[in-house]
Amino acid sequence: MYRVLEKEVLALKITRLKVDAPKVASKAEPGHFLIVRVDEKGERIPLTIADYDREEGSITIIIQEVGFSSEQICNLEVGDEFLDLVGPLGEPIKTGGYNKVVCVAGGLGAAPLYPKVKSLHKGGAEIITILGARNEELLILEGDFERLSSSLYVTTDDGSKGHKGFVTDILKQVLEEEDVDMVVAIGPMIMMKFVSQLTKEYGVKTIVSLNSLMIDGTGMCGGCRVTVGGDTKFSCVDGPAFDGHLVDYDEQLRRQNFYSKHEQEVKDHVFGGEGCRVNEG
Amino acid sequence: MKGKKVKMPEQDPKKRVNNFKEVTLGYTEEEAIKEANRCLQCKNPLCMQGCPVEVDIPDFIALVAEGEFEKAAQKIKEKNNLPAVCGRVCPQEEQCERKCIVGIKNEAVAIGRLERFVADYARGKEEIEVIGNQDKGKVAIIGAGPAGLTAAADLAKMGYEVTIFEAFHEAGGVLTYGIPEFRLPKDIVKDEIEKIEKLGVEIKYNHVVGKIKGLEELFEEEYKAVFIGTGAGLPRFLGIEGENLNGVYSANEFLTRVNLMKAYRFPEYKTPVHTGEKVAVVGAGNVAMDAARTALRLGAKESIIVYRRGEDEMPARVEEIDHAKEEGIRFELLNNPTEILGDKEGFVKGIKCIRMELGEADDSGRRRPVPIEGSEWIMEVDTVIMAIGQRPNPILLKDAQDIETTKWGTIDACDESGETSKEGVFAGGDTVTGAATVIEAMGAGKRAARAIDDYIKNLRK
Ligand SMILES: Cc1cc2nc3c(=O)[nH]c(=O)nc-3n(C[C@H](O)[C@H](O)[C@H](O)COP(=O)(O)OP(=O)(O)OC[C@H]3O[C@@H](n4cnc5c(N)ncnc54)[C@H](O)[C@@H]3O)c2cc1C
Ligand SMILES: Cc1cc2nc3c(=O)[nH]c(=O)nc-3n(C[C@H](O)[C@H](O)[C@H](O)COP(=O)(O)OP(=O)(O)OC[C@H]3O[C@@H](n4cnc5c(N)ncnc54)[C@H](O)[C@@H]3O)c2cc1C
Ligand code: SF4
Ligand code: SF4
Ligand code: FES
């Protein structure tokens, strides 16, 4: 179960895995995610379902190495298995009934964006894609998006490919020129914040997808909470996609950093951590 | 000799705050026999009325008194599938022991401690029950907490082919993710679950029903009846300013990180938990005590219970409150948090509280706390854990709109049979009652198993 069927390294520290999970594949919709655990001592790691094939019974995930667990996942080889895989979780997003949609991806955000674009395209929408990355090496899925988009723009921070600058530069231009009914933006929190600020000026509906810290993914711990339009929501069951104009990004940015310093402890494998008393059992 | 219960040995409080090992150590054989002899073997044993699963209390105690510990274990097992668990966590002082005749003038017989002794004695010695063919049809159970496990075990014994669908990667529900190791060792929970699996019950992990599978599909897959035992897992917050600051946890998150994901063995296990130096736990039930005592073990210099009512109103078991006090938990009673304060980076730095006094009794008979005007003060803490109750998780119900619920979001089910408004669907445990007790959840599972058996028999006619 949950065996890795195919593996491909897409870019530096970014890996695509196709995994055998027929039941999850049969229920997956754009916007869903899953939670995996590699071994007995591992964390529960949420990952977007980047693609699914119901006939083959497989799902695809795209992972970026950012810490211990994501590195562990990237190191899996064809034939290896996940210990646990639970999904599909979260609320799918509505993809039918749109005429023209701008899809904006920042870095790895292209992965969770892809199934949504596929479905929007199938639903009859014309797609304009803006892919942003720090540099050319970190750009992923360009070909896949190209096939689905009427136009595709690339931006890089250093200008190594496409427009030098941010996705919002291009987005502004597109919003000026085109009659757009929705923007879907997925990427770093800070990017989603600025995209939402911009689209608000133009009064264009915007969907973002949050990657809050999660444990269970079923609404049980509240660790993934986020303020949306003044109300507390749980990202895992109410989202992870939300109305971009209502999300409190600053709170999310802060919450994401809560555990950053512990990452180093996992890497260094120091025992105990910050004054833990437990010395036995 | 009839005066007091035989004391149960415990780990020294100073030592135990440095480990996650069990606090209470259990009776020796001699102690158990001595305590068993305090029982009067009543002809009309009132104690049994206090037990939601009707354990044959006098009979098993008589066997203990005779030194027939294994037989005593079998006796308990006729009614209770999880005796090692119940003997530890049942609020006996409000259930079986409260009704015990001896308790009128003296301390009641220590039924819970004896039950625990017997279950621990029999551990590993029991023969696996041989059961007949499981050919009466398929039954699906949703949730592997005490309610679901009990219903599953009973139905398997009756000859049904039972499958449990569990959202997590481990079974046990709150027994596994909520109640800490030092109160309920996880290998005991695992043992009990294995025994239930040996009855032929299949547990499918990582299956969130309502997501990977809907209720309707279960019936399409020829399950004849479904039991919902999904618990009350949705945490509540106070709705005050500052609750999303870094350092504010729900008790569920804090305890799940520690118990299920074993954060107390971080970084060997990779899930971290940030405990902080000064921890405030809001609430005073079992969950709050567990969170406060866990925080202390994880290195908090101070761990404080903040509760808006008084000492007598605390809902936790007396034993847990006593243990918490012995370990040095500070109690700030008659204090209600009104705001959580943060620093520039968004980390908790304190709680603003208002002092309360007790006024008239409310509907529940408890005196209602009223704020004392102008009494706000600031308690400096860096972690806040909310333990103010849980509600049923709506994931499953979102997918099954035809199951009627109450205004509290619990499933509207018949108390006696667990029947819901949807044919063939039964429910029990915390998802029906709201957060309650292990043994009540088991009682509900048991009654539902009987009702499901009747229901399926009638289908065949
Ligand atoms: C709904 C959802 C969908 C996701 N989809 C994907 C995906 O498709 N591909 C993918 O690579 N990642 C995805 N993520 C993020 C992924 O779960 C995290 O990268 C992973 O948990 C990091 O684990 P780690 O142990 O490797 O890193 P850690 O050691 O835990 O952390 C390393 C660094 O990453 C940050 N970090 C930790 N967790 C998260 C998080 N949840 N989101 C953002 N930053 C985090 C930490 O603050 C730290 O700075 C998703 C997250 C969510 C909630
Ligand atoms: C910290 C803490 C301490 C406690 N201490 C005590 C105590 O000392 N004594 C006592 O008697 N009681 C205590 N309780 C209460 C007691 O644990 C509960 O009343 C009891 O566990 C309820 O049992 P249940 O089977 O109804 O639900 P749970 O134990 O909550 O189990 C429900 C199970 O269903 C699963 N589930 C939920 N939704 C789905 C879904 N959609 N699909 C599949 N699976 C699903 C969950 O993952 C879980 O495993 C405590 C509770 C807590 C939280
Ligand atoms: S199961 Fe609980 S209530 Fe029943 S006899 Fe045992 S300890 Fe008492
Ligand atoms: S009521 Fe007390 S004394 Fe009587 S049988 Fe029960 S435990 Fe024994
Ligand atoms: S991850 Fe626990 S509630 Fe969302």
Image (cartoon, rainbow, N blue to C red):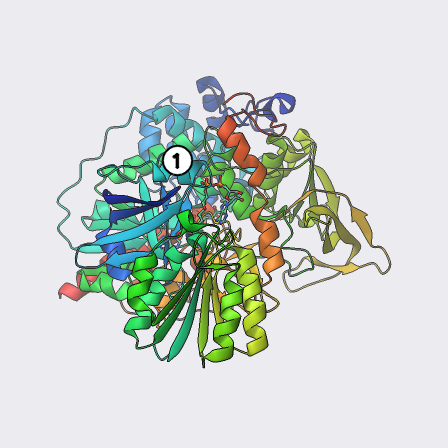
Note whether B451 is above or below B46 in the view shown: below
Task: Specify the quadrant of the image occupied by residue B142.
Answer: bottom left
Residue that badge 1 annotates: B189
Residue, far right: B374
User: At 33% across and 60% down in the image, what residue appears?
Assistant: B211
Q: Secondary structure at mark 1?
A: helix
The residue nearer to you, when weighing B214 against B334, is B214
User: At 12% across and 45% down in the image, what residue appears?
Assistant: B133
Report x, y in % for residue A105.
Answer: 44, 60
Marker count (numbered): 1
The residue nearer to you, when weighing A274 against B433, is A274
Report x, y in % for residue A106.
Answer: 46, 57
The residue nearer to you, when weighing B225 against A56, is A56
Note whether B20 is above or below A259 in the view shown: above
Q: Is residue B161 left or right of residue A88?
A: left
Q: Is mark 1 within 8 Å of ligand 2?
A: no
Q: Is residue B263 left or right of residue A254?
A: left
Report x, y in % for residue B92.
Answer: 52, 41
Quadrant placement of the N terminus of chain A: top left
Residue type, numbered disc 1: Val
Q: Is residue A24 left or right of residue B441?
A: left
Instruction: Tell me, yes or no, if residue B39 can be seen here.
Output: no
The chain letter for the residue carrying disc 1 is B
The crowding category of the residue bearing disc 1, from other C-alpha atoms within 10 Å (few below 14, some 14 to 19, many at least 20), is some
Task: Specify the quadrant of the image occupied by residue A29.
Answer: bottom left
User: At 17% across and 59% down in the image, what residue appears?
Assistant: A55
Instruction: Tell me, yes or no, if residue B372 can be seen here.
Output: yes
Report x, y in % for residue B245.
Answer: 65, 52
User: At 60% across and 24% down in the image, what residue appears?
Assistant: B18
